[in-house]
């Protein structure tokens, strides 16, 4: 841990965000796995137009930013517009990305979080950002698009899952079984 019991530090917060991301994705994917193929692929008024495209975009961007942060290649060299056309392999890949992100955040030292990372955007422009800022952006990105999928689920036969019961100890009983199943700390 990077802070103390009274006031956790930035590293602790980012670790908690990475763990929450894994839990939230698990809940959202569990709901989506109960959808019919028609509901999953259906065109809907949304940023990307379907639940499938949103979920694929989330895992794509997770891998893209992990590449930028670690220098490792996670995405196929010939990646196109879509990583996954089916939900089951997408879920498997998202679990791997979630675990890699947790591992990265758990290992990050304060000096790593304060350091800079340079990368090219998809349009080719070069940018340099603080690592902590890149992680904050990534978590906001995930929350944003999960919220869109959550909204789209409300127009299907599957109820959208509760995604805001992660951080407070008063909500622990609502997530404890899932945290154990995901091998996340019970806090």
Image (tube, rainbow, N blue to C red):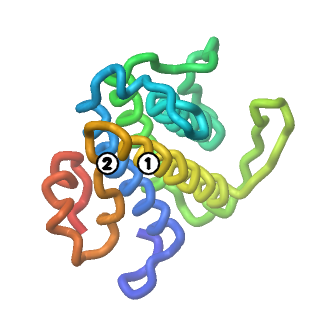
Tell which of 98 and 148 is nearer to you.
148
In this figure, which residue is indicated by the disc labeled 1? 151
Q: Quadrant of the rendered structure where residue 64 is?
A: top right
Which residue does the image show at 22% across and 49% down from the upper left? 183
Q: Is residue 130 visible?
A: yes
What residue is shown at x 33% (from left), y 20% (from top)? 37
Q: CA distance from mark 2 to mark 1?
A: 7 Å
Residue 170: percent from the left, percent from the top? 22, 77
Query: Residue most toward the top?
Result: 78
Residue found 53% across the figure and 70% down from its top: 10
User: Where does residue 159 sit, x and y in percent of width and height?
Assistant: 27, 46
Element carrying mark 2: loop
Q: Quadrant of the N terminus?
A: bottom left
Residue 29 located left or right of residue 2: left
Specify few, some or many for label 2: CA neighbours under 10 Å numbering under 14, 14-19, or 20 or more: many
Viewer-closest of 117 and 36: 36
**Which residue carries the number 2 mark?**
160
Q: Count neighbours of disc 1 (C-alpha within 10 A) and say few if under 14, some if 14 to 19, many if 20 or more.
A: some
Work out which residue is located at the far right of the displayed protein and give it. Answer: 125
Q: Position of residue 135 (x, y in %)?
A: 58, 54
Q: Quadrant of residue 96?
A: top left
The answer to whether any part of residue 112 appears in the image is no
Q: Are marks 2 and 1 in contact (CB under 8 Å)?
A: yes
């Amino acid at each position: 841990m990077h802070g103390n019991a009274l006031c956790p530090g930035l590293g602790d917060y980012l670790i908690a965000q990475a763990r929450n991301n894994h839990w939230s994705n698990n809940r959202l994917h569990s709901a989506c796995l109960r959808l019919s193929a028609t509901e999953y692929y259906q065109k809907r008024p949304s940023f990307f137009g379907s639940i499938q495209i949103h979920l694929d975009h989330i895992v794509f961007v997770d891998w893209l930013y992990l590449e930028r942060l670690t220098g490792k290649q996670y995405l196929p060299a010939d990646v196109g517009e879509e990583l996954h056309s089916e939900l089951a392999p997408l879920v498997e890949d998202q679990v791997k990305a979630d675990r890699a992100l947790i591992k990265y955040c758990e290992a990050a030292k304060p000096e790593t979080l304060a350091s800079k990372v340079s990368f090219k955007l998809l349009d080719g422009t070069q940018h340099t950002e603080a690592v902590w800022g890149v992680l904050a952006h990534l978590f906001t990105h995930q929350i944003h698009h999960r919220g869109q999928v959550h909204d789209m689920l409300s127009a299907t036969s599957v109820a959208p899952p509760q995604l805001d019961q992660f951080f407070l100890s008063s909500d622990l009983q609502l997530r404890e079984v899932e945290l154990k199943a995901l091998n996340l700390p019970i806090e």
